[in-house]
Image (cartoon, grey):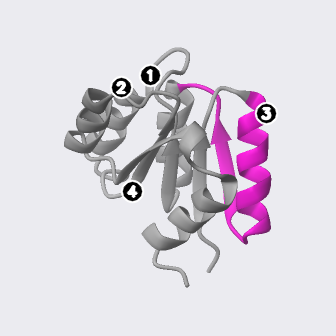
Amino acid sequence: MTKKILVAEDELPLKLALTTKLESAGFDVVSAANGQEAIDQAIRELPDLIFLDVMMPIKDGFEALEEIKAEPKTKNIPIVFLTNYGHGYMKENAQSGGAADYSVKTDVSLNEIVSKAKKILAIS
């Protein structure tokens, strides 16, 4: 069965690059352009994994994380933060909020993101 990934990213070029790379690796990808859309898509689509940006319009990634983890249908979906912010306290906030992982965009390649998705979803 194909695994579904939600990409919540407001920067269109990166969202398109991530979507293309994940789809070429065999994932079904849905996307969101802001935090509220990420929450709505998570509840509607029930993805197997969520890549979530921190700084997004309407609601930020931390607000989205909190609401997704508070919803019984979505609370067990692994969430990986993919952000430009490498501040230690942000990583700590993400992990204490229930995020599975936290990556700084400039530190990971698209291939590493695909590998991370496969690892979290236990796909060889």
Residue named by callout 3: 13
Q: Residue at x 73, y 50 (%)?
A: 19
Q: Of helix, strand and loop, which one carries label 2?
A: helix
Q: Are marks 2 and 4 in contact (CB under 8 Å)?
A: no
Residue named by callout 4: 77
Tell me the quarter of the image containing the C terminus: bottom right
Q: Who is closer to the viewer here, 52 or 31? A: 52
From the viewer's perspective, tell me whether residue 71 is left or right of residue 29: left
Q: Are marks 1 and 2 in contact (CB under 8 Å)?
A: yes
Q: Which stretch appears magenta?
A: 12-34
The Cα atoms of the two marked residues, 2 and 4, are separated by 16 Å
Residue named by callout 2: 63
Tell me the quarter of the image containing the N terminus: bottom right
Task: Name the residue at the front extreme.
Answer: 107
- Per the image, is 95 magenta? no
Q: Position of residue 115 (x, y in %)?
A: 57, 67
The Cα atoms of the two marked residues, 3 and 1, are separated by 19 Å
Mark toward the start of the polypeptide (2 vs 3): 3
Q: Residue at x 35, y 28 (%)?
A: 62
